[in-house]
Amino acid sequence: MGMSVATFARPEDQAAINVFVVSSNVRLRESVHGKLVHPRWKVFEVGSGAGALEALYQQEGRDGVLLLDPVLPDLDPDEFHGMVKRRFPNTQVVTLNSRTGQMQVGEGTPTAASQWLMKLMNTDAMYGEGREVSDGGTSRGSEKVRYNLRGMVGNSEPMKRAYELARMVAIRDTTVLVTGESGTGKDLVAQEIHQISPRRKQPFVVVNCSAIPESLLEAELFGYTKGAFTGAVQSRIGRIHAAHGGTLFLDEIGDMPLSLQGKLLRFLEQGEVQRLGGNDNLKVDVRVVAATNVHLKQQIEKQLFRDDLYYRLAVFPIQLPPLRQRMDDLADLVALFLGRFSAGKVMSFDAMHVLAKHHWPGNVRELRNVVERATIVVGLGQEIRPEHILL
């Protein structure tokens, strides 16, 4: 941090401090714990975000430092950080940043304890081993490479390509079209593009084009003026305008009614929104990410989707593979869901064989549901066997 040790108090000069080491990587936790040997530090090793929240509650929110691995098995780190900040304001979060190999304090002024920890920890040595498990890295010479995006699991070649493309485009304002079958994680890619973009502190607004009735979708997207239709008792901005400065995620764009596609195209080309029933043009600064599980070129042939809108959306396409084309990721995904739904239970070899033979038409979403069912069917047992797999 560029700060001399003399500028803050050493931990032996302070009251007892709780230190929570949060990571699913056992070797990482042990490595960190081994460096925090001091009578005034009470160290807790926790394997998940939910476990960390429980540990914090048990300590009744006393002053402390939470060392957070940026890859959690159950919660998005940003979401988790926000929960800690709201519920335990006396606990400071320090991220063990696997991308830079450094420790980074979250929002707020660093406390004396967190400053001392950052000076103490030899992060290069700490990250020298065991990061492949939690970060999905592989060796390229002596360099550790992190492939996966937060919230996503898998290091198969098709997924590595998707991660690479997402990172390439995230720093720009280019319009992105994420395609793939239902259940492949298109929404997670859209969220991560926003989270690692310069717009990450601005709104991320989601519009599911298939979930909103056609009669309401135009008003939801573009807003309306008072009296524009029955029930419009006051003017309202739409979700496009609500995303000003941030990212608009148009999910299931292939289901957008043809009657609205022209108006969406005008917004994409001009950056302006005209509310329903109004003549005012509102200038908006929005980055658009769209997603669909529909083959849009086939929709164009059927005259159900405008070709000019397609080419305006597909400036930078990202294709997500179905689970059947990334079966190398199956074991990691199963481990993730087991940790999420019932930590301590294990999948037997024969049960994994059953999962490996399945075609997975519902992709990762279907796998998640199957694993959750299995953790229920197995009851108090620890080992999930083929008879517990309900496909």
Image: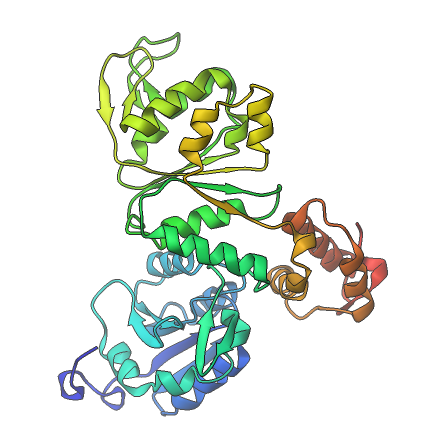
Q: Residue at x 72, y 59 (%)?
A: 375
Q: Position of residue 390 (x, y in %)?
A: 80, 52
Furthest residue in direction right, as rendered: 387
Q: Position of residue 90 (x, y in %)?
A: 30, 67
Indicate whether 219 appears above or below 313: above
The quadrant of the rendering that contains the N terminus is bottom left
Can you see residue 334? no
Along the line of sight, the residue nearer the viewer: 265 or 122:
265
Q: Residue at x 34, y 14 (%)?
A: 276
Along the line of sight, the residue nearer the viewer: 264 or 213:
264
Image side of residue 325 versus residue 48, left or right? right
Can you see residue 19? yes
Q: Position of residue 340 (x, y in %)?
A: 60, 61
**The quadrant where residue 120 appears:** bottom left
Indicate whether 270 appears above or below 374: above
Q: Residue at x 34, y 43 (%)?
A: 174
Q: Residue at x 72, y 45 (%)?
A: 361
Q: Position of residue 317 (x, y in %)?
A: 47, 43
Along the line of sight, the residue nearer the viewer: 126 or 18:
126
Indicate whether 41 appears above or below 278: below
Along the line of sight, the residue nearer the viewer: 61 or 371:
371
